[in-house]
Amino acid sequence: MRVFVAGGAGALGRRLVPQLVARGHEVTATTRSTGKAGELRALGARPVVVDGLDAVAVGRVVAEAQPNAIVHQMTALGGAPDLRHFDRWFTTTNELRTAGTRHLLAAAQASGVEKVVAQSYTGWTNSRTGGPVKTEDDPLDPEPAKAQQESMAAIRFLEKAVVEAPLTGIVLRYGNFYGPGASESMVELVRARKMPIVGTGSGVWSFIHLDDAASATVAAVERGAAGVYNVVDDDPAPVAEWLPHLAEAVGAKPPMRLPVWLARVAAGEVVVRWMAEGRGASNEKAKRELDWRPVWSSWRDGFRHGLTAAVEADR
């Protein structure tokens, strides 16, 4: 199969491209940076340098590649996380989720592409009421924090556009990434004791190792039916459980604890909601319908043995 990976040089794209190549697919992968073209070539892909927000250029490179499937992994996060100004931090990523998605879908339809698989997210987006673990049928949070309203709107746009497109549209809601290229900023915060347990730490998180996210994406490309799938491990857990485990795994001191009122003043509403009110996600649909299983079935082993190459080198 000919597969076009938009955003192939990102943290997930770099794990996805080799898996697609190993499965015998012919991969064209995009990057915005000429300096990363060689890396994509070394991974086995045909590199293309293109701006995902340039509609004409996107249409041209998709037409040239003539793919059977497009995988939308375009994001643009860089620098230190800025949770207090979340939407500002996600500005370009949100443009890629809206305008970038429109451009890819238009190019797909113009070139007769059969399937589009797009990256979404499950975590702070989940409704903060009801049970601790959500399925794909549960609603997204109807009242996101003020600093996340634009990001939520972009996610809603992407999911609706992809699922309703006149092709096989698949949305993969990945959990919180960890693994080489995805964990470094979180590990740095934990080591600096800047990632506290807020209140009782009852917010539930779902994680996914990058390699498992990539294997689920391959499964979606090869045999996925249209729809939305949560791509997470088997072990959603409250912050009070996983954060001390992560600190121990990277040789850090135990995380500090902050009362909700102080965390709201010090870090903002986004942090409070995520750490104290978050909901996890179920992967049962992905396992059942994509015939997929995560190798790292729990963050418990993943944090100790599959976190980042940098952590292993430091210990």
Image (cartoon, helix red, strand yellow):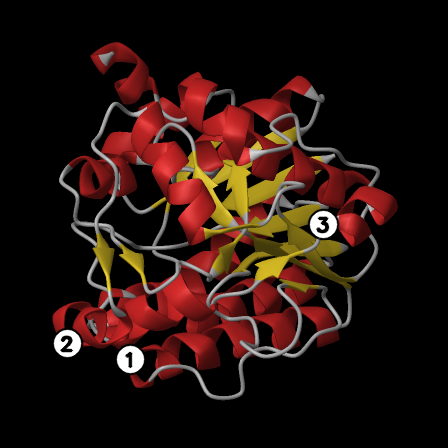
* Cα separation between marks 1 and 3: 28 Å
Q: In the image, is 73 to the left or to the right of 308? A: right
Of label 1 and label 3, which has the lower sequence position? 1
Mark number displayed over residue 147: 1
Q: Residue at x 55, y 29 (%)?
A: 211
Mark 3 residue element: loop
Q: Is residue 203 above or below residue 250?
A: below
Q: Say which element carries label 2.
A: helix
The quarter of the rendered structure image containing the C terminus is: top left
The type of residue carrying mark 2 is: Val
Q: Quadrant of residue 252?
A: top left
Q: Is residue 177 above or below residue 37?
A: below
**Which residue appears at 77% of the width and 36% of the height?**
292
Would you say 24 lies left or right of 33 here?
A: right
Res 283 label:
3
| Whether residue 45 can be seen here | no
Q: Quadrant of residue 222?
A: top right
Image position, residue 145 (x, y; %): 36, 82
Kindly identify the residue that appears in the image at 65 percent across and 25 percent down: 295
Which is more toward the observer, 164 or 156?
A: 156
Find residue 279 and name its label.
none
Q: Position of residue 43 (x, y in %)?
A: 47, 20
CA–CA distance in space, label 1 to label 2 = 15 Å
Label 1 vs 2, first from the N-terminus: 1
Residue linked to disc 2: 265
Which quadrant would residue 192 be assigned to in this image? top left
**Do the CB atoms of the residues marked 1 and 3 lie less than 8 Å apart?**
no
| In-front residue for pair 7/174 | 174
- Nearest to the eye among marks 1 and 2: give it: 2
- Residue at x-position 67% and y-position 32%: 294
On the image, the x and y values in percent for residue 196 come to 25, 53
